[in-house]
């Protein structure tokens, strides 16, 4: 951990229904491996009159990974998918050339008090696949690889690491690992990781060389060898990253691409409502006012 290159703290961002903690992209670090966007959702409490209602909106050039710690979200998309994601499961939606989806509180929870807490992640696609046909996969929590290292609990949410492979169908070399400990432990990762690596502290803390790092921040390593650190009791961290792409990535609203021209075409198609519609949904989130397209 002595090779930390940058520390990224959560920045409050309003997504319409509630505040989230934005982690990526960051002005000093646009991507970590293929990971280009990370929001920490909640924890938020909603009463019987408050619900998550993110209406139809488009994506291109990326895969979304939704991972909940608490709560339920009903996913609908233009492929006709209707799936309720629950805590511990993974929704993996690959936009490719274009997909539209909505995220709402399921009907069974709309009239009662509820809690929401989780991560919303975007993984950029390789250039040769950024215009692939869209896909959707739901992976149940019990299908994700889990193992113990002494008193430390590990789960491989996506990608490959430690000789294991997640069933999430990723399109580039990456890893997304959950590590939990209820006691003081020393974590030694050695040469298990590859490419670029980041460590997100959800709760608790870790320390290295006498420095304690608190929750709600990402530590980005200069190289993937995160080496050794001490994890505090009742701590949950996520280690993520992978091989970076050789090309620059641009991001504007919900669009990711290797060229600004691809993004401008997607924006025009959304304005003109040329994207496929979601069965059973009406309305849509309009394109926001023009702003500068962010490069990687």
Image (tube, rainbow, N blue to C red):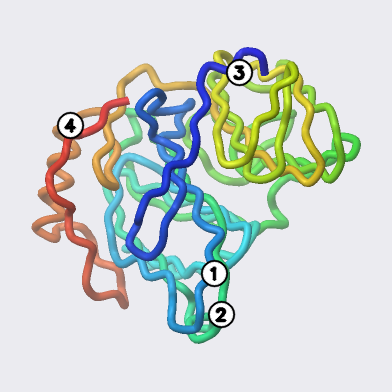
Image quarter of the N terminus: top right
**Residue 112 image-quadrant placement:** bottom right
Question: Front-most of 199 and 284?
Answer: 199
Query: Eyeballing the image, is 133 above or below 246?
Result: below
- Where residue 224 is drawn, which disc sits there? 3
Question: Front-most of 39 and 21?
Answer: 21
Of label 3 and label 4, which has the lower sequence position?
A: 3
Q: What's the distance in space between the residues labelled 3 and 1, CA to CA?
A: 36 Å
Q: Residues within 10 Å of mark 1 (few under 14, many from 20)?
A: few
Return the x and y of residue 4 as percentages of the image width and height: 58, 17
Q: Which residue is depicted at the point 23% across and 62% down?
A: 285
Return the x and y of residue 208 as percentages of the image width and height: 73, 21
How many tags in the picture?
4
Is 181 displayed left or right of 132 in the figure? right
Q: What's the distance in space between the residues labelled 4 and 2, CA to CA?
A: 43 Å
Q: Which residue is depicted at the point 50% across and 73% down?
A: 46
**Residue 241 image-quadrant placement:** top right
Q: Secondary structure at mark 3?
A: loop
Q: Are marks 1 and 2 in contact (CB under 8 Å)?
A: yes
Of label 1 and label 2, which has the lower sequence position?
A: 1
Question: Front-most of 105 and 233?
Answer: 233
Q: Are marks 1 and 4 in contact (CB under 8 Å)?
A: no
Q: What's the distance in space between the residues labelled 3 and 2, CA to CA?
A: 42 Å
Q: In this figure, which residue is indicated by the disc labeled 4?
A: 260
Q: In this figure, which residue is indicated by the disc labeled 2?
A: 113
Query: Eyeballing the image, is 73 above or below 31?
Result: below
Q: What's the distance in space between the residues labelled 3 and 4, CA to CA?
A: 30 Å
Of label 3 and label 1, which has the lower sequence position?
A: 1
Q: Are marks 4 and 2 in contact (CB under 8 Å)?
A: no
């Amino acid at each position: 951990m002595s090779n930390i290159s940058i520390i990224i703290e959560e920045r409050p961002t309003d997504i319409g229904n509630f505040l989230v903690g934005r982690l990526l992209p960051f002005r000093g670090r646009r991507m970590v491996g293929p990971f280009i966007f990370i929001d920490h959702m909640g924890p938020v409490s909603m009463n019987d009159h408050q619900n998550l209602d993110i209406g139809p909106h488009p994506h291109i050039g990326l895969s979304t990974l939704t991972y909940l710690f608490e709560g339920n979200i009903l996913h609908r998309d233009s492929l006709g998918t209707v799936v309720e994601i629950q805590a511990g499961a993974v929704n993996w939606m690959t936009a490719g050339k274009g997909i539209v989806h909505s995220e709402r509180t399921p009907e069974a929870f709309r009239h009662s008090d509820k809690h929401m807490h989780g991560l919303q992640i975007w993984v950029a696609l390789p250039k040769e696949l950024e215009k692939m046909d869209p896909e959707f996969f739901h992976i149940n929590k019990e299908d994700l690889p889990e193992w113990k290292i002494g008193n430390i609990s590990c789960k491989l949410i996506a990608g490959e690491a430690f000789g294991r492979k997640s069933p999430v169908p990723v399109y580039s070399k990456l890893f997304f690992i959950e590590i939990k400990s209820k006691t003081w432990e020393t974590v030694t990762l050695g040469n298990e990781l590859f490419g670029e690596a980041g460590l997100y502290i959800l709760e608790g803390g870790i320390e290295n060389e006498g420095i304690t790092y608190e929750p709600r921040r990402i530590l980005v390593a200069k190289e993937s060898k995160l080496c050794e650190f001490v994890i505090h009791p009742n701590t949950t961290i996520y280690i993520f990253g992978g091989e970076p792409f050789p090309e620059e990535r641009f991001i504007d609203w919900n669009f990711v691409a290797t060229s600004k021209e691809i993004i401008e075409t997607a924006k025009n198609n959304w304005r003109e409502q040329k994207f496929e519609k979601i069965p059973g949904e009406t309305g849509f989130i309009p394109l926001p006012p023009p702003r500068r397209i962010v490069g990687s």
